[in-house]
Image: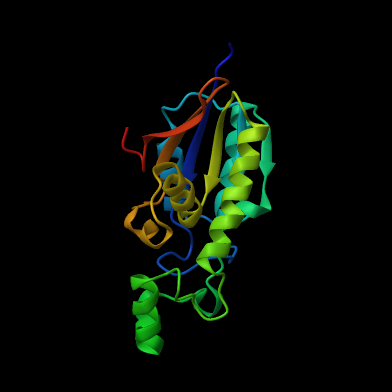
């Protein structure tokens, strides 16, 4: 009987430029601080066999540089891009509080049923991410891979492993350059089991 173990490390991007706003699908670059944050996060991790990344440059540029350093293949997966915040993209929280505080408070209280104007519904975002996640587990089975991604992506994947309700995902903290690890064990007799090894850099 062969039992496969797959490890996937989830690395949120570092601080972008500009920071502290709803970036969503915007293609903001990493700041100099963000580069340092991400380098520090991976300094003591063993080399990965494959690096997977969101196409947005705050993830992709670091992932491609890291993959080159480790001489590992890199795969850019469009489905791992961040949730689209619609009309809120590019705006800071303070700005939204002045423009439409009621909508912002409703989103924070119940993000499933209060999508930002013209934004991507959280249910659709979750479905997109989990479909890409399942494909990643097929493609990288038995390997140790790195997924460079966004706060929302990290929350959805970790939330699925821990069976956290969708409306409670924002209770998961995902700091810049926070690193999480998921272990997936495929046992022919007992099926698949996923577990969270550590989250947000706490190991």
Q: Where is residue 188? Give x, y as percent.
A: 58, 20
Instruction: Report the residue at 55% width, 54% height from top.
Output: 58
Please tell me whether residue 21 is drawn above or below residue 197 in the rendered image.
below
Report x, y in % for residue 94.
34, 79
Residue pushed farthest bottom? 99
Q: Quadrant of residue 1?
A: top right
Q: Nearer the viewer, residue 161 or 59?
A: 161
- Residue at 40% of width from left, 87% of height from top? 100
Question: Which of the colour schemes (rainbow, by chain, secondary structure, one colour) is used?
Answer: rainbow
Image coords of residue 191 (percent x, y): 53, 27
The answer to which image quadrant residue 111 occupies is bottom left
* Closer to the camera in the image, 3 or 97: 3
Q: Is residue 45 left or right of residue 191?
A: left
Please provide percent x and percent y for residue 121: 54, 69
Say how many tags the image has. 0
Location of the C terminus (image quadrant): top left
Q: At 68% from the left edge and 40% from the top edge, which residue is drawn?
A: 75
Quadrant of residue 146 within the rendered picture: top right
> Can residue 161 be seen at all in this image of the molecule?
yes
**Vertical placement of 85 versus 190: above or below?**
below
Tell me the residue at 34%/53% (across/down).
Answer: 173
Q: In the rendered image, is residue 55 in sight?
A: no
Establish if 56 lies above or below 102: above
| Residue sitting at the far front | 189
């Amino acid at each position: 009987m062969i039992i496969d173990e797959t490890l996937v490390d989830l690395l949120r991007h570092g601080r972008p430029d500009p920071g502290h706003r709803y970036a969503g699908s915007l293609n903001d670059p990493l700041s100099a601080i963000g580069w340092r944050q991400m380098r520090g996060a991976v300094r003591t991790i063993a080399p990965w066999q494959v690096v997977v990344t969101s196409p947005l440059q705050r993830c992709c540029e670091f992932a491609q540089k890291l993959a080159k350093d480790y001489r590992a293949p890199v795969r850019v997966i469009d489905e791992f891009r961040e949730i689209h915040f619609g009309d809120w993209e590019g705006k800071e929280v303070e700005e939204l509080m002045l423009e439409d505080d009621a909508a912002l408070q409703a989103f924070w209280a119940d993000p499933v049923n209060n999508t930002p104007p013209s934004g991507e519904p959280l249910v659709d975002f979750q479905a997109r991410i989990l479909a890409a996640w399942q494909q990643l587990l097929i493609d990288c089975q038995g390997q140790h891979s790195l997924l460079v991604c966004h706060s929302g992506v990290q929350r959805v994947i970790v939330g699925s492993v821990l069976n956290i309700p969708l409306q409670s995902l924002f209770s998961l903290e995902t700091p810049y350059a926070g690193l999480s690890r998921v272990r997936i064990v495929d046992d022919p007799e007992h099926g698949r089991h996923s577990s969270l090894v550590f989250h947000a850099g706490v190991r």
